[in-house]
Image: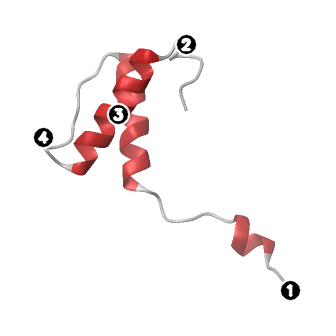
Amino acid sequence: MKLDLMQLLGPTRPDPVWQAERAGWRCYVFGNGCGYRAGTRLAAAWERGFAAAARSSDPMGLML
């Protein structure tokens, strides 16, 4: 069996939900609001990221 490490470890398609969670965390740190339409799954992911940053003891240090 031969594995191509570049294919396994290479770039993948971006995950929009993870990106929205990360954006929520960053918005908490920088004091910005949500840019996603209310009620969408991306807005819910943004809220999760924002809430996680609010609970964190060091949101700036742990920001991705």
Tell me the residue at 53%/11% (across/down): 57
Q: Residues within 10 Å of mark 3 (few under 14, many from 20)?
A: some
Quadrant where the C terminus is found in the figure:
top right
Judging by the rendered image, the residue that carries numbered circle 4 is: 38
Task: Say what amino acid the circle numbered 4 marks.
Answer: Ala
Which of these two is toward me, 57 or 7?
A: 57
The amino acid on which the numbered mark 3 sits, given as a three-letter code, is Arg
Residue density around tag 1, few if under 14, some if 14–19, many if 20 or more, within 10 Å: few
Rounded to the nearest angstrom, the CA distance separating label 4 from label 1 is: 47 Å
Q: What residue did someone put label 1 on?
A: 2
Query: From the viewer's perspective, is 11 left or right of 27?
Result: right
The numbered dot on residue 34 is none
Residue occupying the far top of the picture: 57
Spatial separation of the CA atoms under disc 4 and disc 2: 28 Å
Which residue is denoted by mark 3 in the rendering? 48
State the residue position of label 2. 58
Q: For residue 53, what is the image quadrant?
A: top left
Q: Point out the image quarter for the N terminus.
A: bottom right
Question: Going by the picture, which residue comes out furthest to the left?
Answer: 38
Q: How many marks?
A: 4
Decide: marks 4, 3 in contact (CB < 8 A)?
A: no
Cα gap from disc 2 to disc 3, whole angstroms: 16 Å
The location of residue 52, given as percent across then percent down, is 42, 25
Identified by mark 1, the residue type is Lys
